[in-house]
């Protein structure tokens, strides 16, 4: 048995939790000083940095990249726009490879502007992913499909359930040749009555596990999330379903306008709020 509170090296911080106000090198230093084992940076944070230097800093700090966030939306009204998106995602895979990222996170896009054809949107996404899989294999960075809450289907992600994500994996990569997998984000999938069976179905296709809780009432579909409330119920349940001693929890704690204040990296509470009373079996 092991207590996750004593193993900060098993955790990864999604750098969006800091509101894009802290330079990436400083975030890496802060995480390393606290023994946190990984980060999940966003592409926008890399634009002003020397990618090779970031990779060297991570290696020197004995830290990993649990995932690079996130894909350019695949859905668009014209073929030319969709091609640009695929090309941009191909370049992002190259960047992820430089960072030795464990996966490239996919938030796939909603309805193409000016349409309400959800079926067409999903077909566009699958076509885009299909075109990227060979390059994903070539650079050694698997693609992680992340289903988002259905409230975001129109504007952010037409991929809404874990079952749907796994169906796409089976369709696009039936033999696992390309390592296509999924990201399980508590915030987005906690409500799904089919969740337990789909987690068991997913098995090794689970490439990332994101931790944060859904606030009630929710007024912001991106930022209204917290960590503390879920410790004794949802998170414990998820750990049991995952059944893995190598759990890497990506802490997607983000600023809520009602809970007030961004405390990430300022105190040990972030690990205590998630890991207290949580024991993972070896």
Image (cartoon, grey):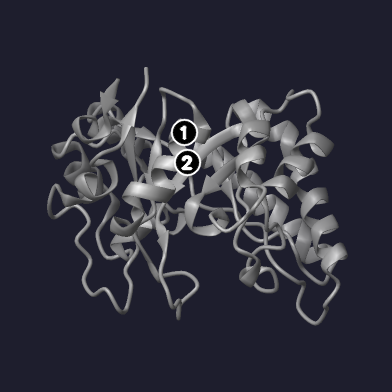
The quadrant where residue 141 appears: top right
Asked if one can make out residue 79 in the rendered structure from this viewpoint, the answer is yes
**Element under disc 2:** helix
CB of mark 1 within 8 Å of CB of mark 2?
yes
**Element under disc 1:** helix
Compared to 88, does 118 lie above or below?
below
Q: Quadrant of the C terminus?
A: top left
Residue 78 drawn at (x, y percent): 83, 69
- Neighbor class of circle 2 (other Cα within 10 Å; few <14, some 14-19, many 20+) is some
Residue drawn where x is 66% and y is 38% of the image: 197
Report the front residue among 218 and 179: 218
Residue 218 vs residue 230: left or right?
A: right
Q: Which residue, given by chain and number where applicable, does mark 2 sit on? A: 238
Asked if one can make out residue 40 in the rendered structure from this viewpoint, the answer is no
Q: Quadrant of the N terminus?
A: top left
Residue drawn where x is 72% and y is 62% of the image: 158
Residue drawn where x is 62% and y is 55% of the image: 192
- Pick out the residue farthest to the top: 282
Compared to 177, does 217 lie above or below?
below
Residue 57 drawn at (x, y percent): 26, 35
**CA–CA distance in space, label 1 to label 2:** 5 Å
Q: Which residue, given by chain and number where applicable, does mark 1 sit on? A: 240
Residue 230 drawn at (x, y percent): 36, 54
Residue drawn where x is 29% and y is 51% of the image: 24
Residue 238 drawn at (x, y percent): 47, 41
The quadrant where residue 278 appears: top left
Compared to 5, does 1 lie above or below?
above
Report the front residue among 168 and 69: 168
Report the front residue among 152 and 178: 152
């Amino acid at each position: 048995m092991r207590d996750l509170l004593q193993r900060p090296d098993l955790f990864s911080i999604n750098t969006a939790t800091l509101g894009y106000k802290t330079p990436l090198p400083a975030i890496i230093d802060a995480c390393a000083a606290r023994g946190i084992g990984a980060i999940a940076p966003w592409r926008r944070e890399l634009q002003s940095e020397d990618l090779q230097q970031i990779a060297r800093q991570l290696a020197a700090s004995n830290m990993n990249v649990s995932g690079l966030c996130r894909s350019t939306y695949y859905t668009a009204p014209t073929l030319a726009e969709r091609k640009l998106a695929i090309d941009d995602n191909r370049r992002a895979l190259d960047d992820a490879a430089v960072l030795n990222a464990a996966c490239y996170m996919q938030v796939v896009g909603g309805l193409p502007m000016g349409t309400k054809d959800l079926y067409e949107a999903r077909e566009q996404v699958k076509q885009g992913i299909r075109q990227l899989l060979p390059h994903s294999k070539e650079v050694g960075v698997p693609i992680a499909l992340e289903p988002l809450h259905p409230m975001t289907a129109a504007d952010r992600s037409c991929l809404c359930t874990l079952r749907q994500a796994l169906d796409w994996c089976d369709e696009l990569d039936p033999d696992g040749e390309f390592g296509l997998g999924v990201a399980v984000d508590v915030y987005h999938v906690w409500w799904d009555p089919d969740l337990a069976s789909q987690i068991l179905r997913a098995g090794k296709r689970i490439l990332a596990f994101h931790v944060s809780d859904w606030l009630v009432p929710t007024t912001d579909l991106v930022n209204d999330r917290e960590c503390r409330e879920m410790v004794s119920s949802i998170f414990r349940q998820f750990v049991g379903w995952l059944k893995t001693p190598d759990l890497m929890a990506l802490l997607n704690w983000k600023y809520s306008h009602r809970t007030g204040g961004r405390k990430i990296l300022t105190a040990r509470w972030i690990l205590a709020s998630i890991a207290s009373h949580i024991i993972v079996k070896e």
